[in-house]
Amino acid sequence: MFAGCFLVLGSGAAALWWGQERIIGLFVQQANQYLRTPVRVGKIELSLFDQFPRVAITMHRVVVTGSLPHDTTALARAQRLYFAFDAWDLLARRYRVRAVTLTDGQVAVRLDAQGRPNYDVLQMDTAASATDEPFAFDLEGIQLGRIGVTYVDASRQQQFAGHTRQMRATLSVKGEEVTVRAEGETHVQALRVVEDAYFQEKDLMLTTHLRINRQTQQIAVLPSEIRIGQATYGVAGTIGYYPATKLNLRLEGRQTDVQSLLALLPPRLNHRLAGYRSRGEVYFRGTVRGEFSTKVNPRLDFQFGCRDAAFYHPQYQQEAEHVFLTGAFTNGSAHSVRTAVLDLRNVRGQLGGRPFSGSLRYSDFQEPSVQLQLLADLDMARATRFFPVAAVRGATGTAQLSLQVAGPVAQLRAGRATNARGELTLHDVAVQLRAYSQPLRRLNGRLELRGNNVTMQSLTGYLGRSDFRVNGTLKNTVSWLLTPRQTLLIQAQVNSGLWDFDELLRLPTAVSTSKRGGRAGGEYALELPATLALDVQTNVRHLRFRRLRGRELHGTVRLRNQIVSSPALSVRAAGGRASIRGTVDVRRPNLVKVSTTATCTQVPLDSLFYVFEDFGQHFITARHLRGQLTAQIDSDVYLDGALYPLTDRLEAEVKATVRNGELNNFAPLQKLSMVANREQLRHLRFAELKNSLYVQSRTVYIPEMDIRSNVRTASLIQVTGTHTFDQQMDYHLSIPLLPGLLRRPDAAGGTPTGPRLLLAVRGNEQDFTVRYDRARAQLVTGARPEAASPAAAPRPTTTRPGILGRILQPTTRPSTGEADTRPATVPRKSTPKPAAQPQPGEYFEF
């Protein structure tokens, strides 16, 4: 028996070998009758085993040219193409192609801008019947494997990309009617319409049944199915394809859920909802009717909804339960976005056991108009987990929301939301924002929406340790929420028990200092949104910043275009009262400019130096000073991104008066024991001291001032000089040697004169010297000055435009024809007297 089989196979193989040229010739001749475009084939062979038990004509490296003129893109490419026919037909010499198999290929279907296709490659000849031809197509099966498919319609701006893993089809031709049945698995990369992509990266199971009438040029879609996951979408109806595409289709979803419906939408519409899942009954059905062309769209009417469904997100572990809604979508009478309407009605459900309800109507997608009603009793923790907000890390507490909005969206964005009403009542709400390390907590109060503005009524809460009670208005709120670069104006009265600036200015833990432009280890930052404006009346009982402990802060704070300003702020601090007016410019995050005019009254000097940490130096500290300071300070201060002062840019003028002052245990005074005993110098007291100090280029300039002290032998000390931020001192002292002669004024009626000891204090805090001021003595006596060493030369006072540009300019004096070599801080004496000088070989050094 086996021998007989082998004999038959051997005979068949021999017959094929002897007759393959004739069979292939007949196939090529017959195929050319159906083709309008050239086909390139690398190799053609006849095989008994490729499609066994059928005999196959195998074509390798096949390229089918498209029908568009001047189109260089091939319609189809395939590594292998099999045409199979039965062995019995071979024995009867009736060559009927029963099956076609296409593997490892690519099909590129295209329509140009005029709607002409590239797939018009077949020409049907119905004059001869299949039985009249020695070679004919009588297809019983078509198989496609690993075939990539692309579709581009330039006239409608549509694209499709996908590939079939395995597809089986049958083709039946009866006269003018062609019946196609197909079933298989297809992976869709994307179906793109204009800029929107649908069905992205989806696996589809197709079961289609089509009946094509070539005479009426119409496709009847018999009940067919597209399955995505567990959801099944049924399609039925008719498609007319010439001269224009006319659709009359019915669609229905079965066993659908929210994710299968969202899969049909482009990312811009479903990106925030794509992760949600549902349980329960979710349905949709609809119709597509009318012409589909470059100028006309069909009419779309869909109904959808859910009944007692639950929606949840696997990551957030929260779900909305017992949800009911009825929805509808239509593109309207004009079949366009102008007449499109989305309508959600009878929406109700529960989130965390708390009810919500509402409705939404969204019409005219080109110039949209909205009608929204929403009522919700919210558990904030569950609500923010179910539908996260990017700026919020978490929340707790409860709230009641009532919202009604109606009107064109353009009017809402433009601030003309006359039909916007709503209320939000907060009960012990806490919110952790991602941008701040301090939480907002214990929020209570009510917010009322009226038109474009929100009114805050007794809104209380805490930001970290700082508390607030706010009554006021958020103006332009709706426009600010809906339109980029709109400004939100807050007009409010703020009362607080404590403002803790150690927390309020602290950097968020998630943001590195380098991104702020601050130094390594910086702790503070000041960032203000460009879209925020303030007009706030403040009343703060206590404030805290580093060592500062202030009380009774009152005044007005304004913010416009990232510039904070105040016409008047007053505060009690360091044992006195201070008033401040000025601006803080944060438009450049790494160069914050603070321009202020501050006045203080009866502030204890020791408290002031303690609060401001001795102003960054250790030469004169809080333990050295006593007295009451009254001053006015005009300053321009620059800060980097971490709020460190840029001292090389600092400029200031300080007009100060100190009453009942004391200078205690000051090391340089201890070296003046030749004019007074050490005990008196250890506790130097003075009734009143007035002077103006200037700061520029990291240097404090001290004009000449008189210090009238309790030391009888040095009751009037004159001091002038400079002190740099690097703690380099250059002070000049003038001490009378005969105090009893001080009553005698000079010829000009100015300061009393007499024998004086002129001293210079130079060096730094740790290493300084007190020496006889020889250079100044020569200027006072009128003697020709000797060449001074660079260390002893007075510092030049170079200035630049700014707060000191006018103050530090040299005073204009009548020309005497001689160069004036005096330091700028030393006044000219009209009748100089001889001053005490060391004798040859002697010098003063204490």
Image (cartoon, rainbow, N blue to C red):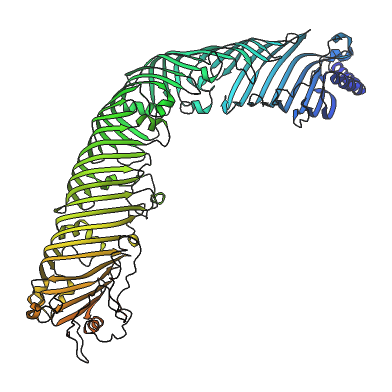
Decide which of 307, 802 is in the foreground and name it. 802
Q: Is residue 516 above or below residue 785?
A: above
Looking at the image, which residue is at 18% across and 61% down?
656
Q: Does any portion of residue 328 appear in the rendered image?
A: yes
Relative to 511, is 181 on the left or the right? Answer: right
Looking at the image, which residue is at 37% across and 53% down?
591
- x and y percent of residue 635 in the render? 28, 57
User: In which quadrant of the rendered view does residue 399 lie?
Assistant: top left
- x and y percent of residue 549 in the render? 18, 50
- x and y percent of residue 221 in the render? 65, 10
Image quarter of the N terminus = top right
Q: Is residue 572 above or below residue 434?
A: below
Relative to 139, is 403 on the left or the right? Answer: left
- x and y percent of residue 661 in the render? 12, 64
Looking at the image, which residue is at 18% across and 74% down?
668
Decide which of 428, 484 is in the foreground and name it. 484
Q: Does any portion of residue 671 appear in the rendered image?
A: no
The number of callouts visible is 0
Extreme residue toward the top, this view: 175
Decide which of 250, 42 is in the foreground and name it. 250
Looking at the image, which residue is at 23% across and 69% down?
703
Image quarter of the C terminus = bottom left
